[in-house]
Amino acid sequence: MSERRQAGPVASASAGFSALNATCQCLSLDQAQLDRALDADADAAILRLIRERCPHALSAAPVFATRAQLERMAAILRAVEDVVALPAYREQVLARAPAIARHDPRGPRGALFGFDFHLRENALALIEINTNAGGLMLNALLARGQRACCADMQDLVPDAAQIAALERRVVDMFREEWRLGGAPRALEHIAIVDAAPAQQYLYPEFLLFQRLFQRHRLRATIAAPSELQLRDGALWHADGRVDLVYNRLTDFMLEQPEQAALRAAWLADAAVITPHPQAHALYADKANLALLSDPAQLVALGVPAATRELLLASIPATEVVTAEHADSLWRRRQGLFFKPATGYGSRAVYRGDKLTRRVWQDILAGHYVAQSFAPAGERVVAAGDAAAMLKFDVRNYVYRGEVLWVAARLYQGQTTNMRTPGGGFAPVYSRDEAPAAAGT
């Protein structure tokens, strides 16, 4: 284990930004400005729905980071991409994946991954990778309502051109997935698919995606998988033939009966489905973190030394929970987090120091990983006349190794929840040195 490192140090400027996260009570979200921007874009009804359906999804407080920290995150996720590209890695991971994940996607890589980091003072840790990361369009919406709370913050606030560029990149991402699928014609019709989409907590984001696609002259349908049919070698909805499915399902391997048409379309190459089962198997199965944080495994895979060092310094040591190592894991549980290997949204995640024997038996009966505890960042948030200290993580929205946007999620409790007053998605403000007086 000689190659194992602690979470890597970053530039000394992180001390100044950590102080801002701990003391600054500035609010950067201007609700009136956001209302004006949406009135101009005919999205005001969506904002009302957000306030009714998920009132704690958008935080008024920014999170601060250094450019060096963001650059290190980007280097880490590129290192993961380098490992995933190795034939030995793919063979090992897909051998234990469900058969559907071994179906060749014919080119598409998977849209909109999320690389989630804990960032605290001079250390950061990659704690999770997701292949259907939610929230990007909510963050684009949030960016429209940002204002500088003081002169030192002015250059940190995104402008209209940056937001427009993000939206173009999102549309280009889906068009690229369509192109990689080998289609001879232009993309025309996208279906945004999830189970009972109108009942989903983040349904407003589906509407934002639909509006974005429509502004770029693409037909966009929000649909449940049961509304799709496979016939004549193509995937169909009542709105017409579906070219590409933006897959927001958490049934990652399309196993439920309602996914029958989608599963058949995937196996028959009848539509581009993104993200797809193989992408989830290669990136988001948390058992992969055990491989990516194991020095011997990385050597066996042929990972170059510099890449190994970066990954081992940045991914908390992770191991698959087995009955064989149950006694050892129970003794060491105080410093561990237990997560279902194919879980999502922080469901059934447990801190080891809070485990009961009954829950421990459930973990042993399930497919779990144990991850060394990496503390989340902390951010003080104004709450009326008082202040609350919230935790945060940092999500990099990624396509093909390129970071499209960076956002934070503020929360109280064990894991992110989008239900904490003052919490939710938050902008990440960054530059080389901390602002001298940002709202403090």
Image (spheres, rainbow, N blue to C red):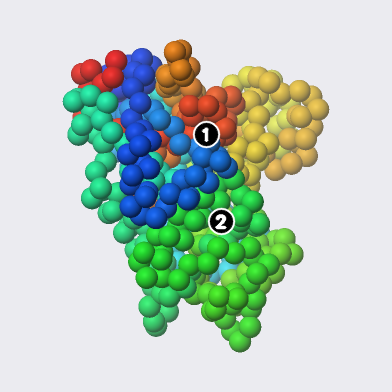
Horizontally, residue 58 falls left or right of residue 412, namely left
Q: Which residue is mark 1?
A: 56
The quarter of the image holding the C terminus is top left
| For marks 2 and 1 on the same chain, the one whose residue lies earlier in the sequence | 1
Question: Between 232 and 333, which is closer to the camera in this rendering?
Answer: 232
List x then y, in percent, for residue 42. 39, 55
x and y, in percent, of residue 35 in the image: 38, 42
Q: Is residue 90 left or right of residue 218?
A: right
Which residue occupies 73% across, 26% down?
Answer: 327
Q: Is residue 78 in sight in this rendering? A: no
> Looking at the rendering, which quadrant does residue 267 occupy?
bottom right
Reply above or below: 259 against 203: below
Q: Residue 66: which disc?
A: none
Please state which amino acid type lies under the numbered disc 2.
Arg
Q: SS for tag 2?
A: loop
Name the residue: 42% across, 19% down. 382
The mark lying in front, picked from 2 and 1, is: 1
State left or right for residue 394 relative to residue 50.
left
Label 2 crowd bin: few (<14), some (14–19), many (20+), radius 10 Å: many
Horizontal side of 357 relative to 52 (left or right) equals: right
What residue would you read off at disc 2?
A: 248
Horizontal and vertical percent for residue 66? 28, 29
Q: Determine if residue 386 is in view.
A: yes
- Above or below for 216 versus 360: below
Would you identify the image quadrant in which residue 341 lies?
A: top right
The residue sitting at the top extreme is: 386
Please tell me which residue lies in front, 266 or 281. 266
